[in-house]
Structures are given as C-alpha cells and as structure tokens.
Image (tube, rainbow, N blue to C red):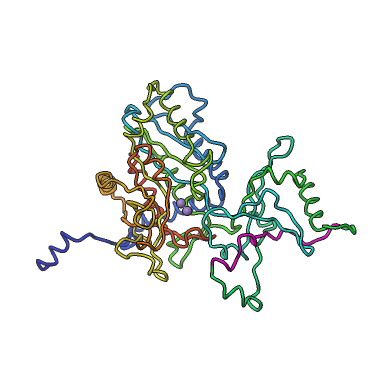
Amino acid sequence: MTYGEELKDKLFKKKVNGWFKISDELRQEIMNYSQRYMEFLNNSKTEREIVKSSVKIAQEHGFRDINEVEYLNPGDRVYYVNKEKSMYLAVIGENRLEDGLNIIGSHADSPRLDLKPNPLYEDQELAYFKTHYYGGIKKYQWTTIPLSIHGVIIKADGEKLEVRIGEDDNDPIFTVTDLLPHLAKEQENAKLRDAIKGEDLNLLIGSEPFGEEIPERVKLNILNILNKKYGIVEDDLSSAELELVPAFKARTQGFDESMVAGYGQDDKVCVYTSLTAMMELGNISRTAVCIIADKEEIGSMGNTGMESHAFDTFVTYLLNKRGENRVNLLEKVFCNSKMLSADVDACLDPIYANVSDKLNAGFMGYGVALNKYTGSGGKYSASDANAEYLAEVKRIFDSNNVKYQISELGKVDVGGGGTIAYILANKGIDVIDCGVPILCMHSPYEVASKYDIYSAYQAYKAFWK
Ligand code: MN
Ligand code: MN
C-alpha cells in the first residue's frame, strides 16, 4: 500500500455491499429467515391480522396478556392489545423502569383501498363497491390487479363477522377496472395523478342478475349471496371495516433470490423483524418495549394511532405492576427512554436516481438504514435525532457487527415524509428512525433486500440487548 492508500483506508468511510463475500452459512440463515417473513406477510395483510399473528407468536414465546398479570418481575414477558389494531409488548429488565425503556416502534397499517360506509351500487348491470383510498397511493397502481377483501362486519345484533376473501386459490378475487389503451387518449394525456380519479376506484364485484324482472337485479343477487354466506343485509356494510389489499403472495425476487417482493412491507417488515428480535431476548437490564402502531399511514390519529394516549396507559400499567409508580413518574420514564422508530426508508432506485442524493441515500443490500431526520422542505416537521444519541446507536451496531447505513429520504425539496418518531420524541424520548430501505414504497408490490431485512432483525436485537 502507498502512503496515500493507507491514509485513505484509515480516513475514508467504508461502504461495502452486505452480500459481497458473504459466507454460505450466513446466506442460508438469511434465506431461511426471509422465508418465515414471507409466510408472515401472506398470513397478515391488515393491521388486525398483524395483531392477531403477533399475539400468536408472542404467546408461543411465553408472553401473557398484561391484564392477566398482577405483579411484574424481571424476565416477565407481557403484551397489551388495543382495539385489535395496535399492540405493545414488553420484556421486563433488571433495572428500575424509571431509568428508562428501550423502545422499538413500527406500524402495522399499509396503504390500501377501504370500502366506503355505503359501498354497494349497480351500474349498467354491473355491481360495484365504492372505495376510499387509505394512505399515500399512486392510484393507477391499484387498477387491474387482483384484490382481496379483509376485515370485519358488525351486524345489528352486535355479532362480529371476520371476512377474508380472495386469498385462497378457490376464492374469487376483485379488481378495479381501467380503460383500454385504444380509447384512452384523453386519459393518457392527463397528469399521472389525475388520470385515475379517487372516486373512480370502484371494485367490480358482480355481473349476474337475480332471476326476476325487477330493478337493480345484479345488486340484489350480490346481497342475496352475501346474506346466504354471512347473514348480512346492506345496512350491515356501514358498520364494517373492509379493506382491499393485493391478493397476490409475497415472493422471492431475482435469479439470485436476493430480494422479497410483497405487499405491505411498509411497515410489516419492521413489525416482523422487531417482533422476532424481541422473542429472543433473555435477561436484560433495561426493559424492552415493542410498539406495533396503527394509522401511521394517515397521520397517526385516532385511538389506535400513535398520537393516542393508549401507549402511556401501557407504560403506566408496567409502572403499577412493578410497584414503582408515583406522581409524575411517567414523564421521567419517557425522558430516560431511548427508541428506534422502526419504519422503512426510501431505497435508491437507479432508474429514478435523480430524486436521491447519492451521498445520503439508502442503498439496497447495505444494511438497515438510520435516518437522522425525515420531514420535508428544510427539515420541516422532522424529529432530528441528537448527535449524541446517533453516536450511541452507531456504537451499539458497530460492537455487535450490525451492518447499517446512514441516509435521508431523498434530495432536498424533492418531497419528504414522516414516521411516528416525532410523537415519541415529543414525550422526551431519544428517537431515531431505523428501518429497511424499500423500492416502490406504497405500491401494491414493494421490494426489499433479504440482506437488509436480516440486518434490521440483527439491529433490533442488538439495541434491546
Ligand atoms: Mn411506514
Ligand atoms: Mn408509509
């Protein structure tokens, strides 16, 4: 080595693709882990399904419902489910809770189409469900793909029906139609965002008329089928939460099988990696808390969103059941706590590289990404992590051989986004965003590197330990 080369080696930041010269054992471990992750994705496409799957995984690993536990001791493992759509888990550490918690928080909701409260209509002897899209979608991506219907219907007498149709190969699927190119001259000249109107995202659900000469025969036939199958009438559809999600399955992508393509990886990839990391915790000094939030994609509002005080209630439970609580202690717990906001990052897409600053972008295969801040246009609305805290997280990752990269969402003034980080930061918690870089974020088929998925899992484990 020349002196210059030596100096460069010492001074320059090193960036190496995680797959480069990877051992066969590690590669196999990554493949096995990704396989389990894809199964999780296929079983849980909505926030309610995520919570259900997560409770099952937690129970299998000795976690108990906190409502059934009177006293908490170090080593105890508990969970709290909020309205079936968000949940919190904890592994109690040796230290006092007031010394602070180590929190990792992700979200279970993903962009999709929701049914309107009065969804069903017939037009030209075709039956449709009207939808209202949920979260930031590019509307044209949601036409002409197979969609399944997931959710609940609460009948007049209070009976709750669970709906999941379109996932089984024998189930029917549903689509939103789009115009044939032959007649789409006007549509193709429109701006991309105006070409498909939100009000036109209507789901085609039937075409066969009921066998009698009366108006709205196709709609009647559909309601008759729904009545026979679920015992519901049209009005029951208004007290329902029915979500349309892509009916296709998560799959391995690429000849080298290095990627996962699947719906809802924002942010189910962080749900799965943090949840499985928590399952492996043994004796720890600081109490570990895992948040699986809802409503992140629409601003974290509502009583299952991170802005609600449900999380404070959970931490108060922990304090009470540890026999530690006293007046105003909650604030102190938060000020002593540290958090990774586990949410996906934008991955540099070479085809659209012009929106990313190559020096500060997330790259596929370079490990979990730390975003010091998100926000948009001059860091507006950003929770900007303190340098001291960022250094601390880097030390944890370095000393545990966790591969990570430090990035921001895109070029300055190109756009932006947010996570739940600022909500927890407002409580006084040290927070930094830390998640998997994703291609085609918010599309029906998002892509992530298996290496990065595994890195997130390793990162979360190291943070809690
Ligand atoms: Mn997200
Ligand atoms: Mn998102």
Name the residue located 12 percent from the left edge and 67 percent from the top edge.
4
Position of 171 relative to 88 (above/below): below
268, above or below 127, in the image: above
The relative height of residue 154 versus residue 416 in the rendered view (above or below) is above
Residue at screen point 64% across, 60% down: 199
Q: Is residue 444 above or below residue 336?
A: below
Screen quadrant of the C terminus: top left
Can you name the residue that lies furthest to the left here? 3
Q: Is residue 215 visible?
A: yes
Q: Is residue 29 visible?
A: no
Whole-percent x and y of residue 109? Answer: 52, 48
Q: What residue do we see at 48% from left, 43% from top?
A: 293
Point 69% across, 45% down: residue: 238
Q: Quarter of the image containing the N terminus? A: bottom left
Residue 231 image offset from top left, x and y in percent? 77, 43
Residue 77 in percent (x, y) is at: 44, 31
User: x and y percent of residue 90 in the render?
Assistant: 42, 34
- Number of numbered tags placed on the structure image: 0
Q: Is residue 176 left or right of residue 252?
A: right
Per the image, is 429 magenta? Answer: no
Residue 208 among magenta residues: yes
Residue in the foreground of this view, choosing between 30 and 192: 192
Q: Locate residue 139 relative to residue 283 in the image: left or right.
A: right
Of 465 and 83, the residue lying toward us:
83
Left-right relation of 146 to 234:
left
Magenta segment, which residues? 193-210
